[in-house]
Amino acid sequence: MRHRLSASGRRLGTLAGLFGLGVLLWALTPHFLTVSNLLNVLEQTSINAVIAAGMTFVIISAGIDLSVGSLVAVAGVVLASTLHAGMPITIALAASLAVGFAFGLLNGLAITWGRLPPFIATLGMMSIARGCALLFTEGRPVSGFDPAFRSIATARLLGIPAPVFVTIAVYLMAHFVLAETRFGRYVYSMGGNEEATRLSGVNVRLHKTLVYGVSGLASAVAAVLLTARLNSAQPIAGIMYELDAIAATVIGGTSLMGGEGGLGGTIIGALIMGVLRNGLNLLGVSSFVQQIVIGLVIVFAVLIDTVLKARKG
Amino acid sequence: MRHRLSASGRRLGTLAGLFGLGVLLWALTPHFLTVSNLLNVLEQTSINAVIAAGMTFVIISAGIDLSVGSLVAVAGVVLASTLHAGMPITIALAASLAVGFAFGLLNGLAITWGRLPPFIATLGMMSIARGCALLFTEGRPVSGFDPAFRSIATARLLGIPAPVFVTIAVYLMAHFVLAETRFGRYVYSMGGNEEATRLSGVNVRLHKTLVYGVSGLASAVAAVLLTARLNSAQPIAGIMYELDAIAATVIGGTSLMGGEGGLGGTIIGALIMGVLRNGLNLLGVSSFVQQIVIGLVIVFAVLIDTVLKARKG
Amino acid sequence: MTDMSQPAPLLQMRGICKQFPGVRALDEVAFELQRGEVHVLLGENGAGKSTLMRVLSGACARDAGEILIDGRPVALHSPRDAQALGISTIYQEFNLVPHLSAAANIFLGREPLVGAGIINRGKLLADATSLLRGLGTTIDPGVRVKHLSVAEQQMVEVAKALSLDARILIMDEPTSALTESEIDELFSAIGRLTKRGVAVIYISHRMEELARVGHRATVMRDGRYIATRPLPCPIPTLVRLMANRDITQHFPTPTRRRGAPLLHVEGISHPPRLHDVSFTLHRGEILGVAGLLGAGRTELARAIAGADVPTAGRVVLEGRPLRVRAPSDAIRAGIGLVPEDRKRHGFVPGQSVAANLALPQLRRLARAGVVDRRRERALATRWIEELRIKTPDASARVLTLSGGNQQKVVLGKWLAAGSDVLIVDEPTRGIDVAAKMEIYQLLDRLAADGAGILMISSELPEILGMSDRVLVMHQGRVQAVLDAHEATQERVLQAALGLAS
Amino acid sequence: NRAAGTGTTGRPRVALVMKTLNNPFFIDMQRGAEKAAKDLDVDLVVQAADRETDVERQMQIVENLIQAHVGALALTPSGSREVVPVVGKANAAKIPVVIVDTRLDQKAATDAGVKTASFVGSDNYRGGQIIGEYLVKVANGRAKVAILEGIPGHETGDSRVRGFKDAIKGSPGVTIVASQPANWERDQGFNVFQNILQAHADIDTVFACNDIMALGAIEAISAAGKAGQIRVLGFDAIDDARRAITDGKMTATVAQYPDEMGRAAIEAAVKAMKGEAVPADIGVRIGLITKENAARDSDKK
Ligand SMILES: Nc1ncnc2c1ncn2[C@@H]1O[C@H](COP(=O)(O)OP(=O)(O)OP(=O)(O)O)[C@@H](O)[C@H]1O
Ligand SMILES: Nc1ncnc2c1ncn2[C@@H]1O[C@H](COP(=O)(O)OP(=O)(O)OP(=O)(O)O)[C@@H](O)[C@H]1O
Ligand SMILES: [Mg+2]
Ligand SMILES: [Mg+2]
């Protein structure tokens, strides 16, 4: 029992951080705590949140994926070009997800069969995929789509933007996979002790490869949201997204050492980042100071956690 | 015996990679294998190489330092402002190194006393230090220095550019510290098994904090080279330098898991990156394709190694 | 002892308390140590022995209680404090740095220097060599520790602890991975130290060692101090104090019967540790594997179980040749391996007891890829009871269990898998007497149900008491195969030394 | 072995080094340069850093091209002072340098004694002024403006903002109510402007330092249901922006005609290589693109 508490205790620490940030902004600006602004934050957070969901799988498995931003670009330009080629939306979506998944699997294969450190394999892919996206589009954005496609970003249900539903769906599904399925178990145990997992008869190579596939898939979903939102797919989209996704995951309590963590924390981590950026814009903080504040919040969000943890024992 | 060989075996693999790359370029372009071009490559490599030397300490200790690029900026603008304030070069150099060291120590303190994961602490610092550099200079570069100061980059001895000597000095010193001193031994042992090191009575907090100090110091040395080279210190200098430094270190055979590696590999790793970029420019490869090639070379440079290693045992 | 002029005891611990979430690990524990004595600390798995020692070595903070050395209270907050007070520790869990050499590990934190901060490599190597040789080992001090076997690593730990000029030497199960000859060397080293007045706290579950090395024994149970007895003392008495009940100290009378050949191993090799090993294992049989440190027993187990891929030879299971390229192949064919190095190969420390027990059988416990939590929990509950694993509940993380209980989890994981062929490599390492007997019964029952068991052990009594046949290895080859009735201590040892066949 | 400045084909070889190719502006420039190279029958090498901010990398590229003995260099400086040393190196190697798009810092160049064959382009400060002046005119001196900045500390964006601010200085009715960085990116342009709108519902004008961010802001405006109520001013006149202006979603942008810059730069570089006289300053059109001229005025077809 207590162990389960301690895991969610960690999450509570992060939640407290999010809450504190919210209260602070509420005190500082009347524009923060309005329905329209909060929906706004949720919508803005969705893209990072979706990528971070995939990243959570990777980090729990004791890996890292630096290529997510470039995969967003590749999946985005594939999506956009398929749409521009006059294909139906479903085909375009399928193509984009397939490409994201495939690039993710390539990462996985480089790591499992090539025995490359994940950092290096995905750093290489970051560069390769970016190059592919640029070559494919000759460096130009592909813009302008049907309202039908754009409704993925623009539709509202009960006033709530569609991307928020997509994010919720992604998290429910990902949480189910991580918490309830065999694959999810293997993700944790590979991260906790890979050799013991292998000796327990788990096909580590297969499952680890799939983990990166999942991350690629998540990037592709994010690419769909981004492309619909911006009405444009850019070959230079997603630069530095990996840092935001990793930060959200780690702020959410998933350890970079692998073996522990979960999606409940990650979504809170992503919201902290989203609320922070939103608040800084609302307050009109100067661009130089913004960087300092963002850095401090990242540090303190995690610090709250470690302090709470240390106090407990 | 064979176990002791395996470490340098790893380095030989990387060396083979560098050599292969060199031969390839030699075959492809007459401009590569000229004395002036090779000196040129060495000079260009020096900045990344110096940062990577510090990064090697950090990674061997099982950490990571994402803030190096921002620290280059901070140390650079401090150096430049001190020079512009009319201070003697030595004072300016000392101020710059002290600032780099101090920011590095802050990283270390956040990690040891704040118990933050290095990724998060230095990610925060990356943003904070960048903000400081921008704030300090109001976003403008500080440029134009004495020829005396600039000679750090422009001087030649026997035709060899001064930065090459600086790099060699840094590597000799760093290698000595890592291989021969007690501090160096602790860097390895903290990375290999931190708990065992603590239980052996080593002051892990102190030494780990110092490791990040060393990395900050290396960034400051790189900042001196960069400022002298560009005759200007920019608050936006060094963006993404961390990835190059980490890549050089890991290509050089230092494991991101910590506990093993060394500077001999890192310098080769840095040279691979430098030679590669040089070659691609000489060949006039389009910049989109360059990204793909760079990604592939990063992957293959490490792949050679793991394959050689696997073959051996 | 009653002499009034006698100075205060070297060490006194009083009222020591330590609470972990959900577990009262130490409850008002008292402990006393005289100069020059070897004081044995006894208790069942999870009794709190290691925790008490971790408190004494500054590795873990106490909640209450005081520690006196030479009658004076001392502040003990970090391993450095302990070192300064002359307390040196061999921890139950290995605490070596895998990438560093044996020599570097031995002197970690106390490197000999030439000038400011520069290591005197020559002296370091020379000192390490003489320490290791003094212990009768042939370990190359320049080899990285990760390349050493578990036993060799344990010898490095011993050397490290001895190298400290300690007044109090704590040894938490130093012999769990050692064979007879190393144990002898260790004991004579202990003898030399005590003559110099060094006091030793000695923890072990190998009851037969106690009288050979110890002067007094203190028994703990459930985190409490129970009693202190001078040694020698009848083992059943000590066991009764530990378990608070009578434990039969006999190996179970076999209920199994040897059946048809099950596993046939033919010329299996994995140089340089394993050469051309052949044997047959039958259903209902326990085949013991004996040998000295480094004889290749572990390699044999790993090769059969697919952990390493053998370079030559074949494995035939019930007449069908097996192609084993990974552990998953072996497991699917019904071969399970309880590995020797539990920390590295045995369990996932951050995962719960339940998840660890379920890991090899998730395929069975899952429907359409979804894990059936009810069945997982049932499985965990069953094996926690069966093996009497001391844990707050099935969701406790394995890393919070005591060493012996961790070993039980590893064992339970494979017992639960219901393998046809079960290979157990040092199955009772670190397990208390009472639990050992239960495990022996379990192994017997499994064999009786038709499994074949390959039992590797460095404890000769265990080999002799449990095996139907004994396979003795020497330098990676089969030196002898002895039937139970012809297997005596002398014959096995002779074969292990490569003398007879 | 081969004569300096000749490529594998034996034709003279010139290089165009840009800030980055991750921006349609520079791709257009490349296209103009390629056309000129074809017309003039020279080999063209085009290189750029991955990041617009990475002036050290740009310096390396130039050094490497000096090693490759190109006949002439056209360079769009990532930093107006920071490239001065490497221009000096080109001078030393007797490779003529044509500066494109961003002027060298006059003082730094004089101090270092470097020589350039020519400057081709218009400047970012002037562009900022043009759009600012336009705003003052169309807004009749009353506007509440939000600015979307580029990467903080990046010279290109800074000069555009300075020009813009200087142009509106004389009109007290034109006020800047928010100025936030969106790092040149479309998604950040969207997010940041969406956030700014939450805090300042009365904003009627947004000036984005490049069209990419402006296009993001347009999406934020339509998401907020304010399409048509907010003036969107951009910079660069990339295709998507022209289209948005034609569609009435965007108000104006500044065209710097990058392909003309590219063409003129290569022409100047080739002349300099041949030792012919080149004007020190080759002006390239800079102009405002609004609905009136968006379709007509194209530097493409
Ligand atoms: N870090 C920890 N967190 C939670 N509980 C712990 C921790 N360390 C030890 N315990 C608990 O404290 C109790 C005592 O453990 P300890 O390791 O001292 O037992 P031990 O007597 O050494 O057993 P063994 O013979 O198995 O080594 C056990 O119940 C164990 O689960
Ligand atoms: N991964 C490895 N790499 C290199 N050498 C190894 C490795 N694993 C084991 N060894 C070597 O194998 C020898 C031990 O072999 P093995 O473990 O098979 O013998 P054993 O009879 O089981 O002895 P032990 O009692 O030590 O387990 C050791 O001397 C060790 O040096
Ligand atoms: Mg114990
Ligand atoms: Mg063994």
Image (tube, coloured by chain):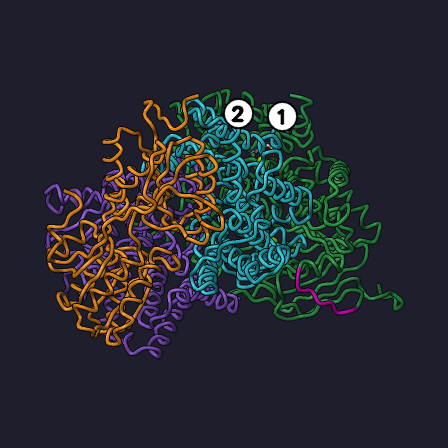
Chain colours: A purple, B cyan, C green, D orange
Q: Residue at x 65, y 28 (%)?
A: C496
Find numbered disc 1 in the image and state the secondary structure of the residue it sits on: loop
When asked about the image quadrant of residue A41, the answer is bottom left
Asked whether residue B289 appears in the rendered view, the answer is yes
Of residues C274 and B222, which is closer to you in this image?
B222
Q: Is residue C10 left or right of residue B159?
A: right
Which residue in the protein does label 1 denote? C475
Find numbered disc 2 in the image and state the secondary structure of the residue it sits on: strand
When asked about the image quadrant of residue C417, the answer is top left
Q: Magenta part of the protein: which range?
A: C72-78
Circle 2 chain? C
Q: Is residue D10 left or right of residue B130?
A: left
Q: Residue at x 81, y 54 (%)?
A: C36
Q: Nearer the viewer, mark 2 or mark 1?
A: 2
Q: Main secondary structure of the magenta part?
A: loop
Q: Where ligand 4 lies, by quadrant?
A: top right
Q: Is mark 1 within 8 Å of ligand 2?
A: no
Of residues C44 and A216, which is closer to you in this image?
A216
Amino acid type, residue under disc 1 in the picture: Gln
Q: Residue at x 51, y 46 (%)?
A: B229
Residue D57: give x, y in percent of width and height: 43, 44
Q: Is residue A232 left or right of residue C227?
A: left
Which residue in the protein does label 2 denote? C270
